[in-house]
Amino acid sequence: MASLHYICSVKLYHLSTPAKKLYAKLKNGFHAALSGFLNSTTVKKFAAKYPRAYKIFIDRFSLDEFTGLPLTFLLLSFFANGFVLSELVNSFKHSAGIVLLDNSFTQWMYSLRVEWLAQAFYWFSKLGSFGGVVTMAVISVIAMWMRDKKIFIVPVLISLLGSDLTMSMAKKYFHRVRPEDFWYYHEVDFSFPSGHATISVAFYGALFYALIRTRRKYASKFRWMIAAVMFIGLLGFSRLYLCVHYLSDVIAGYSLGLLWLLLGISIAEWRMHKKKVKGVSNKV
């Protein structure tokens, strides 16, 4: 139960009074629901009859080991994302409705295209290209190293390299052709899933997570969260506006990127927890 108590004992930092009250209500509600479930007659009977199975279940919520909450979170996200990806693949292969939606949405984006905005999105989308991502990765790693935020380097790199590898493999496997009749410029690789959408969530999401995690004030965290949502949304939308991807390509890219972002966050949280526990034990 100690690990569960840790989950519910997050510091409030410098939240405003209304935010503190809302956070406290949510935390207390979650804690009460969880405690009620664990103290229920059914669960107690299960714990008494199957103590080893009960311990395995409780350990799934622990941050003491990576095989606890981080792995649980990762497996749940893996199956959820795998389901979404498989459904999307089956849809655009076998569903005339999804194909029609993809084509209709692409034609709609094409009808709305104006040159100055297309140019703006073209240059903005360079942030998701190979050169742009490598440049940002190098700058970010150097900045994290110099500012003593090394704990985020490995999670960020894992999110980047893992998402890029699986995205490249998926493109070669599915061989989906891009909407060539409408694209703003020529692209050489396949369409599904969108690499820019994948990278926007996995890599840039990990960078934004590091920024949010190191902010102390709630207002600052909130502003960076809004910036993250806007940036990720615009990078994916830029691919649709330029008609170099179908709508389902971008949705699949977001889903795949989320898997690797969750892995990166899980690793970062696990490492920070281990560091905190080690610091406490050293003081004792």
Image (cartoon, rainbow, N blue to C red):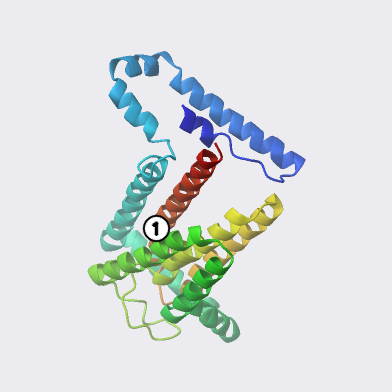
Q: Position of residue 2 (x, y in %)?
A: 48, 29
The answer to whether residue 26 is visible is: yes
Outermost residue toward the left in this view? 173
Residue at horizontal 68%, vertical 50%? 218
Q: Position of residue 211 (x, y in %)?
A: 59, 60
Residue at horizontal 44%, vertical 81%? 131
The relative height of residue 232 versus residue 265 in the rendered view (above or below) is below
The answer to whether residue 242 is visible is: no
* Residue for badge 1: 260
Q: Secondary structure at mark 1?
A: helix
Residue at horizontal 52%, vertical 65%? 232
Closer-to-camera residue (236/67): 67
Q: Quadrant of the C terminus?
A: top right
Closer-to-camera residue (121/213): 213
Count all numbered tags in the image, as a single digit: 1
Residue at horizontal 53%, vertical 82%? 123
The relative height of residue 207 versus residue 132 in the rendered view (above or below) is above
Q: Position of residue 280 (x, y in %)?
A: 54, 40
Q: Is residue 269 left or right of residue 67?
A: right
Is the residue marked by circle 1 packed among few (<14), some (14-19), or many (20+) residues within 10 Å? many
Q: Position of residue 48 (x, y in %)?
A: 33, 15
Q: Amino acid at mark 1?
A: Trp
